[in-house]
Amino acid sequence: MNTLNTQFIVRPAASPAWLRWAAPAAGLALMVWSFGWQSYPLYVMTQVLIYGIAIMGLNLLTGYTGQISLGHSAFFAIGAYATAVLSHHLGWPFYVGVPAAAVLCFAAGFLFGFPALRLPMLYLALSTFAVAVVTPQALKWKQIEWLTGGVQGIILEKPMFPGALADRADWVIMASVAACALCAFLLARRILGSQFGRLVDASRDQPLAAAAGGLNITAIRTQMFGLSAAFTGLAGALSVVVGQFVSPESFPFLLSVSLLVGSFVGGVRSLWGAFLGAAFIVLTPNLAESLSKSAPWMIFGFALLAVVFLAPNGLSGWITGLWRNRANSSPTQP
Amino acid sequence: MQAFLHQIASGLAAGGIYASLAIALVLIYRCTSSVNFAQGELAMFSTYMSWALVQAGASWWVAFVIVVVGSFMLGVALDRAIFQPLRHKPVLSVVAASIALLIILNSLVGWLFGHELKEFATPFGGVLSRAEPFLSAHEAGVLLVTLAELVAVFVFFRFTRFGLAMRAVAVNPSSAELAGINTNKVLAVGWGLAAVAGAVAGLMAAPIVFLEPSMMMSPLIYALAGALLGGIASPVGAVVGGFTIGVLENLLGAYVVGNDLKLTCIMLLIIVTLVLRPAGIFGKTAQVRV
């Protein structure tokens, strides 16, 4: 299985050398600068980072594995509820509860993906669609009310920080989320660049040939589905740390739709594009809600249509394309 | 016993609604090999149009006819504008476009008519009152309409040239094209007919669930379950599946799990069907030549 000839697989062009220094430096500068921010811009930035992680999870599935999920709101919910329950009922601190939630979501994704991924792509979309619609109702189930808090949900206490950081709790939370986002990004990049990542590429682009070559496609897709669920679950868990509240109504089918819109707008085949998509879905309602309650969704819908027709690789693909054109036209290029 | 029969009868009536919507899903599946996730919203949109017409003073059946014709044209227009250009694109694009349509229609209706519940009149009031213990007049009407629709679909596919052309396109679009069938025209009509079947489902459902922009979300899941159970490529399967799900849903709700978990059970049924028999009861497993 590991003897796949990788010689002919086209690798995407490496990012320019200056970007490898500029991007972390800009990130660091932003973190330092944001220390003085008011709580509202900090909140917006935190939301962008959280949804960015969730959309990265979706991209691992949609863009890299070639499968559709309309049910990622369910994994977001599982991550959130796992963290809330571990903290509320067992008193676990967030720094233990959040990773535990991500691991649980990996297991949930793996178990769900195991039967569903043997079928053609469309059927995964159907079954995940059903899961997303059912999630809020299942969370309200009377028999598990003692665990989930039923319709009321669970309210948690705000995490406390020692010393000088106590005044800047919002910033510390944002910085922790940013650290998680960075870890998730590096992990995803490492996985996609590994031998396993190339098997994923093969299973997406040439499933029949890959299967004929001895690749267990279902196993690869199931692992990627688990990974994808873990990322989105991590985002859900972090959303609890930020908001200290979960309730069934926070995870409607429309959350799955938002994630999908973000994924397409940012570009399904990009990891950093996920954060562009997240910025889009976080900022659009802020800007458009003054027009009408329905306006953000109208914009989401037309944005999704526009991306499908005009920019199949999303914003990140568009930006990369601009850069590549410039690189190609410059005379210094060998 | 009386109560049990009553549950079955109203399950059949609800099943009629799911069957209509399932027929719409099957028609689109045969045209595009994809599922139109906006089918429920499309039905909801048609229902709101009919409500607006009745509100403006039209009688129920006049509104019905106008909406059926309008829905057909809307379906054709959507195919021409959105789905025809995507015909040779990956399934991912088609699914994304139908999701986009879902949220656009949902927010458009919310913007035009508001999000609060609205009452919707039934055209079947007063008729059939002798059957009342088992079946309300509206439920009996729904059953009749569904059966009529089923007969119409059967006659269309079996006895008309256009139905034959549509079956040919569904089986093999490129061969049909070579045989002189205008595939684009056939598929556009398929979209139109699906929109009509959806509109009928919406108009039948609205007196029961009340009008609101998300009213067709649960019926869509039930209809999907029905279509999958019967076989997503088979209109007959869709109808049988729709009725089965309707009865099952009512019995589960009344005797087994209560109203809260009905949808969850149906979701599990979808997953179990997909695992055990992905082609459904009436479907044939497609053989792919490599």
Image: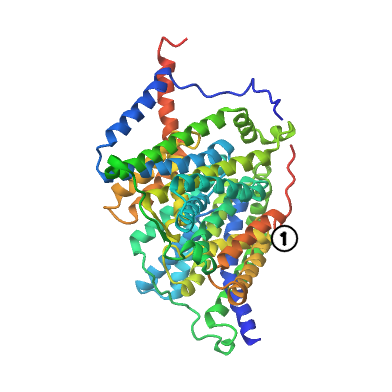
Q: Going 50% across and 80% down the picture, which residue do you hit? A: B124
Left or right: residue A294 versus residue A247 is left
Q: What is the total number of numbered labels drawn onto the structure image?
A: 1
Which residue shows up at 45% across the image and 31% down it?
A317
Asked whether B142 or B72 is in front, the reply is B142
Residue extending furthest toward the front: A163
Type of amino acid under label 1 = Ile
Image position of B147 (left or right of A84) = right
Depth check, front residue: B288 or A21: A21
Does the rendering let one see residue A307? yes
How many C-alpha atoms fall within 10 Å of the one at disc 1: few (<14), some, or many (≥20)? some
Residue B76 image offset from top left, x and y in percent = 50, 53
Quarter occupied by residue B261: bottom right
- Which quadrant: the N terminus of chain A? top right
- Residue B214 left/right relative to A198: left
In the image as oriented, which residue stretches furthest toward the bottom?
Answer: B130
Q: Secondary structure at mark 1?
A: loop
- Where residue B176 sits, quadrant-wise, is top right
- The residue lying at 28 percent from left, 42 percent from top is A168
Chain identity of mark 1: B
- Residue A332 lies, with reference to residue A90, above or below; the image says above
Return the residue at label 1: B281
What colouring method underlies this structural image? rainbow
Q: Judge whether residue B160 can be spotted in this image.
A: no
The image position of residue A332, as x and y in percent, is: 41, 9
- The answer to which of A9 and A32 lies nearer the viewer is A32
**Against B77, is B250 above or below?**
below
How far from the left and from the top, in percent, is residue A209?
70, 32
Question: Where does residue B164 sit, x and y in percent of width and height?
Answer: 67, 55
Q: Is residue A319 above or below residue B132?
A: above
